Image (cartoon, helix red, strand yellow):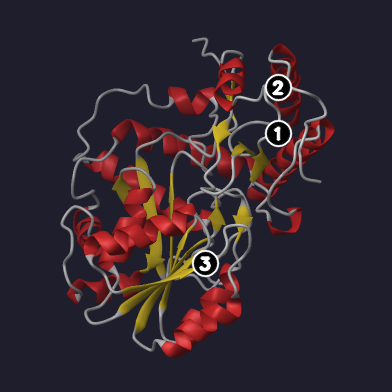
Amino acid sequence: MEIKRNILLNPGPATTTDTVKLAQVVPDICPREKEFADMMKSLRADLLRVAHAPETKYTAVLFCGSGTINIDICLNSLLPAGKKVLVVNNGAYSSRAVEICQYYGLPHIDLRSSVFEQPDLDAVAKALDDNPDVALVYTTHHETGTGILNPIREIGAMAHAHGAVFVVDTTSSLGMIPFDMEQDNVDFCMASAQKGLMAMTGLSFIIGNEAEIRRSKDYPKRSYYCNLYLQYDFFERTGEMHFTPPVQTIYATIQALKEYFEVGETAKFARHRRVIEAIHKGLADMGLREVIPLDLQSGLVASVLYPDDPNWDFERVHDYCYERGFTIYPGKISTTNTFRLCALGTIDVPDIEAFFQVLRQAFDHYHIALPAQYVSK
């Protein structure tokens, strides 16, 4: 079967291998069969390996949905009665956690800071000192809207020193840059299959401290479908998801994990690194500016400032690239016009070099100046 290969430079879903795509073409099966439950048990164990989470302490719980379902689940399920959430917020995805707290009416502190910088650790410490009722500290590892990598190890240490559980959104970092549940002081992390694992959309998972999940059984029940203990308990008793799982996506994820371990995380991390370096080079060669300093970046996302050119039009440039097999993505900084180029998926340096040839053609086609023009120096 010949499958057209598109190069996705958006922050997920990512470009996949044909073997992952074709893993979905399987005989129909009822997901309540023991054979399928055994597959999910093995999948859950493999996810612990990706996060370097010892199986004696942690477990993986699967859910059907996009990455945002994980944020919902962790916040509504892991907050005891009479306690408060501290959201360390320097970007769009931690802001989403704040919105979820607002929708559920969860007591919370929105410790908001600049989207262009890492969080102020002194401000985190002060918030914890001033609010002894904080039981859950939440942040995003890699703020995909900008490409900033947050200092989760330091935040986690402070959370634990104050007796709080530390929950981290690792949706756009897990499996692509180094991460270790124990060393990074993380109690719960989350991701979805279509990003670092380079599988398909529809399957999300939470890796967390099993004792804390069991403890949450007695916390206020704020959701039925999105309750962490309820799903965990059903897995433990039956080996199955409480509700219908995304069957084909699970087959694809199992294949993606097989390929992940065959390649090895060291080699995979190195590939993502050389891809982002090729992106940095291509941008610099065209005179395009990045808005986040390199020393604050994750190594996975470049946020690019729109050029100050009367002929620049993101949608037209996007469409030109898309028609030629390359997808670029708008930015997520409300105060600044940017677009993003990401180093996710099964892509490598030759793909990036081919993309920049097309991007240059787009600039030429629409008479956008090169090197890119900016009013401010």
Q: Which badge, 3 or 1, is on the more N-terminal residue?
A: 3
Q: Residue at x 50, y 37 (%)?
A: 12
Query: Looking at numbered disc 2 in the image, what kind of residue is underneath it?
Result: Leu
Q: CA distance from mark 3 to mark 1?
A: 43 Å
* Mark 3, secondary structure of its residue: loop
- Upstream in the sequence, badge 3 or badge 2? 3
Q: Earlier in the sequence, mark 2 or mark 1?
A: 1
| Nearest to the observer: residue 41 or residue 89 | 89
Q: Nearest the camera: 115 or 350?
A: 115
Mark 1: amino acid: Asp
Alpha carbons under labels 2 and 1: distance apart? 17 Å
Mark 3 touches mark 1? (CB < 8 Å): no
Q: Nearer the viewer, residue 83 or 64?
A: 83
State the residue position of label 1.
308
Question: In this image, 360 relative to 345: left or right?
Answer: right
Disc 3 crowd, CA 10 A, few/some/many (<14, 14-19, 20+): many
Q: Which residue is mark 3?
A: 181
Depth check, mark 2 against mark 1: the one in front is 1
Q: CA distance from mark 3 to mark 2?
A: 39 Å
Would residue 184 be visible to someone looking at this image? yes
Name above or below for residue 198 compared with residue 80.
above
* Residue 343, position as x, y percentages in the image: 64, 39
Name which residue lies at 59% across and 63% down. 150
Position of residue 225 relative to residue 230, above or below, is: above
